[in-house]
Image (spheres, rainbow, N blue to C red):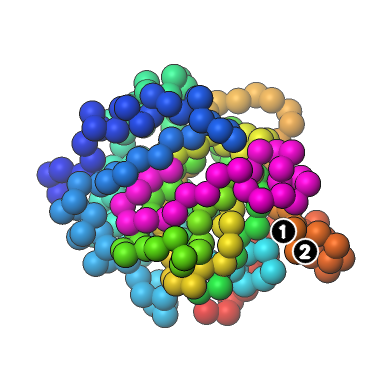
Amino acid sequence: MVKSMIDLDKHRSALSEFWQADPFPHAQIDNFWSEDFCAELLTQIPTPESDLWNGYYHNAIEYKKTLNIWDKFDTVIYQAFTELCSRRFTDYLSSELGIPGLEPDYGLHGGGLHYYPPGGKLNPHIDYSHHPKLGNRRKVNILIYLNQDWQTDHGGQLGMWAKSQAESYQRPDKLIDPVYNSCVIFENSTHSYHGLASESTQGRYSMALYYLIADDSEQKNTKANFLPTSDQKDDVHIHDLIKPRKTERITTREK
């Protein structure tokens, strides 16, 4: 493996503010990977036209491609996800966030590499509460962006909404630019509404991994719950699209 991927000590100060952040607990970290490692990582990201992508979403609430099959990852990408799943990094998150018992989702369900083409979409939503195969609660999300020379006017910001703001179709409470080698870590809950605040004019790449905890609660949601955007709120077709998304993914074979 590359000898230095993440300087954990450097990121402690950002994580110390996790529980105080609004509109829901989160932390932003700049320069997440070491400079040399991230540069290598970038060279192995599949092109938009690559046949490696195994998930395709092209509808009015989601427009993206995903890759979460380990065997399709090139060497450095494989190393990166291995590090995020490692005992070293997982125990570090557990300790710094004060969440005992965190375990990575090795299967990358809903995670892996994500690519949003120009015009990509991801409506405001809350993620599934419980893993559909393991039954454990999804507690922490980590997103790492791999977009060089990203500018705010490219759009495609990560939007974060307070529950009341999202459910009343308001603008996000917070916007985060998906700039190169930046990371966002946030608590997954019934209040953590997030998505793309606007369509981007450029292709947008990210890595995603989720961490779980043991949980015996009976209320379980194994799919994401989406909301219309403000300009979709009166569109009956959008509401009809969102209803089945609560129980199944809306995928397409279109590449």
C-beta proximity under 8 Å, tags 2 and 1: yes
Can residue 18 be seen at all in this image of the molecule?
Answer: yes
User: What's the CA distance linking mark 2 and mark 1?
Assistant: 5 Å
Horizontal and vertical percent for residue 229? 72, 58
Residue 251, located in which quarter of the rendered image? bottom right
Residue 184 vs 57, above or below: the answer is above
Residue 207 marker: none
Query: Mark 2: which secondary structure?
Result: loop
Residue 176 vs 241, above or below: the answer is above
Residue extending furthest front? Answer: 153
Along the viewing direction, whichever of 162 and 111 lies nearer the viewer: 162
Residue 229 marker: 1
Q: Residue 223 vs residue 29: left or right?
A: right
Residue 42, located in which quarter of the rendered image? bottom left
Q: Residue at x 50, y 64 (%)?
A: 155
Q: Amino acid at mark 2?
A: Gln
- Mark 1 surroundings within 10 Å by alpha-carbon count, few (fewer than 14), some (14 through 19), many (20 or more): many
Query: Mark 1: which secondary structure?
Result: loop
In reply to whether residue 180 is colored magenta, the answer given is: yes
Q: Residue at x 56, y 33 (%)?
A: 22
Horizontal and vertical percent for residue 16? 39, 24
Q: Amino acid at mark 1?
A: Thr
Can residue 67 be seen at all in this image of the molecule?
Answer: no
Residue 120 vs 146, above or below: the answer is below
Pointer 2: what residue?
A: 232
| Number of marks in picture | 2
The range drawn in magenta is: 161-184
In reply to whether residue 165 is colored magenta, the answer given is: yes
